[in-house]
Image (tube, rainbow, N blue to C red):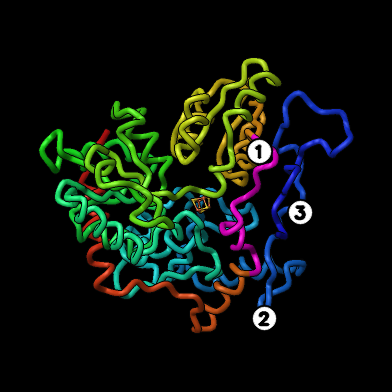
Amino acid sequence: MRGSTHGRAPGDAPAGSTQRALLLLGQGSDPAAERGVECPGELPAASDPALVERARAAKAALGERVFVLGHHYQRDEVIQFADVTGDSFKLARDAAARPQASYIVFCGVHFMAESADILTSDDQQVILPDLAAGCSMADMAREVQVRDAWDVLAEAGVADAVVPVTYMNSSAAIKGFTGEHGGLVCTSSNAERALRWAFGQRPDDAAKVLFLPDQHLGRNTAVRRLGFSLDDCVVYDPARPDGGVTPDQLRRARMILWRGHCSVHGRFTAQQVAAVRARVPGVQVLVHPECSYEVVSAADLVGSTEYIIDTVAKAPAGSRWAIGTELNLVRRLANSHPEQQISFLESTVCYCATMNRIDLPHLVRSLESLVAGRPANRIVVDPATAEHARTALRRMLALPAS
Ligand code: SF4
């Protein structure tokens, strides 16, 4: 795949050179690694030296009518044009708080643009610069599979005890299903509060949660924050008959985890944590809760993207970090905190391929099509789905502050 950095992160020592004690990031840039996807059709060439100027001019021409959102995992070449940066939920809220913007250009992935469409008014248009920017985790839970799973729960006699909770990283259809069945959405920042709310919806010992689609965030939160045991969790695999679980297992379980994962965070391992500790004295390992239970158990600190940014920002100079999250964010942290030693937990883990589909040519095409009055790649969630999804999102918004 073009644009990924299989085998070597920018700034790492090339093969055969003397290995450094710490794989420092932010020690220079690699323009080739910033280039990602093909730009077919009428898109400007990625090599076009005028691209930055074209983006600036189009944005200036649109003025207040456009609001550009940049997820933390986006490339630098795109982030420089973002009016605001953040995680998926913060960005959707920021979009909703900007009613004067006719166009929301969402530099992120498909489910994020859907959430922005759900939370913004009908006369605002949400644009995703590249429609191929999906999310492999969100794609692991399709509505038909989840409805089938609900039937399996009903046949096991447990559906009435189950409250569905879906991670923000899911399609609008899954958020809609969740809202329709009395559940809510959560983020990696509020998953603990969301689970406590969900378990509180049913009598104490009977309550169960169906957690979609990230098994790791569900397991990590239930076991590490709510005190459940690993035996209280079962994994429902939509690829297997009846999810690969027996009715008896479903009756005993408190957490029914959907078999989904992030293809980036799922690649970190506990062995990598042990290796960086052996290589770098005093290093602190900081990882995202989409990593496996083994990885978060081996790490020093675990938290959402915003938590990771905040933790590094508050750390004293000279701190040593090995960070397990998306590489664009880790590189940016390294660049903005040269007083600290920041490395990527594992140099063979690559960028999020779909996040990286949004590049400068796609952004320029989006902005220029808006200037021309021909919006391209609008994301629209159908009204019935949006209504149920909004219910699930509002339940999350109503959660008590931590
Ligand atoms: S980093 Fe993982 S969860 Fe986020 S968009 Fe990429 S695949 Fe999806």
Residue at the location (62% across, 67% down)? Answer: 55
Q: CA distance from mark 2 to mark 1?
A: 34 Å
Q: Quadrant of residue 206?
A: top left
Residue type, mark 1 in image: Asn
Q: Quadrant of residue 132?
A: bottom right
Query: How far across and how far down the image is residue 368, in percent?
Result: 58, 76
Q: Which mark is residue 335?
A: 1
Q: Is mark 2 within 8 Å of ligand 1?
A: no
Question: 307 or 66, which lies in front?
Answer: 307
- Report which residue position mark 3 lands on: 31
Question: Is 73 on the left or on the right of 385, as rendered?
Answer: right
Residue type, mark 2 in image: Gly
Q: CA distance from mark 2 to mark 3?
A: 23 Å
Q: Disc count in the image? A: 3
Residue type, mark 3 in image: Pro
State whether residue 333 is above or below residue 361: above
Q: Is mark 3 within 8 Å of ligand 1?
A: no
Q: Quadrant of residue 104?
A: bottom left
Q: Residue furthest left?
A: 203
Question: Is 192 on the left or on the right of 331, as rendered?
Answer: left
Query: How far across and how far down the image is residue 212, in percent?
Result: 35, 50
Question: Is 5 on the left or on the right of 111, as rendered?
Answer: right
Q: Earlier in the sequence, mark 2 or mark 3?
A: 3
Residue at the location (26% across, 61% down)? Answer: 177
